[in-house]
Amino acid sequence: MAGNLLLKGYTAAIATCLTTELNSLADTNTTALSAQISNGTNLDLLVDFQLHLASVTISSVQAFGTIFLIPTPDGTTYPNWDAGTYANYLAQYYVGNILIKPVSAAVFEGASTQIMLPPGNFKVAYRNMTGAAHAASGNTLSLRTYANSYT
């Protein structure tokens, strides 16, 4: 008998993973890693990210923010991470982009959805590729996790 694979809905309320790390982040720079986020109990399969930029002026149609998800297979030790710079080895942790439309001194809200999660602990990082530094305050990257159900 065939079944259906359905989304279960969000497991918990939206949670902020990066805040002050995004403030005044220069163009092409990468944040430090977020605090550790645990997926060991819920074992959710997917995550949605939401980016809030307090005030941004973008003239390029190619502006975006890049999200990295860094797992720890042993539960405690994370790979080396260079905040500020971008090295090619960081590309293995790339999970998605959030496209940022051209705006002038405006608030921006964007999302990247349906990103696969590891079954344990992980951290998040972000790279600014907007062509300008982010605002000095009020920026956040948040996440919400969820799973599937089979009926």
Image (cartoon, grey):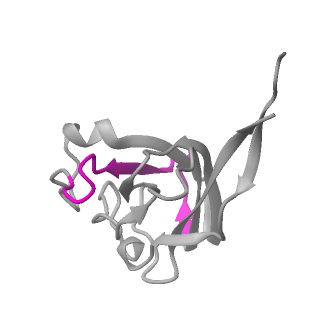
Badge count: 0
Q: Decide if residue 56 is on the left or right side of residue 78.
A: right
Q: Is residue 133 left or right of 57 when viewed as pictured?
A: left
- Compare residues 3 and 138 and report the one nearer the observer: 3
Q: Residue at 21% x, 55% y: name it.
A: 78
- What is the quadrant of the C terminus in the image? top right
- The magenta stretch spans residue 70: yes
Instruction: Give the image location of residue 14, x and y in percent.
Output: 63, 69
What residue lies at 44% left-to-right and 51% top-to-bottom? Answer: 67
Relative depth, front residue between 111 and 100: 111
Residue name at image x 48 percent, y 45 percent: 117
Q: Quadrant of the N terminus?
A: top right
Q: Is residue 130 visible?
A: yes
Residue drawn at 43 percent across, 45 percent down: 118
Q: Residue lying furthest front in this view?
A: 1
On the image, the x and y values in percent for residue 91 come to: 30, 38
- Kindly indicate the quadrant of the structure image that contains residue 103: bottom right
**Quadrant in which residue 76 is drawn:** bottom left
Q: Residue furthest top?
A: 1
Where does residue 63 sit, x and y in percent of width and height?
A: 51, 49
Q: Is residue 3 above or below residue 15?
A: above
Report if residue 101 is visible in the image: no
Q: Is-magenta flag for residue 121?
A: no
The stretch of residues the image draws in magenta is 56-78
- Residue 40 point in image, percent of width and height: 44, 56
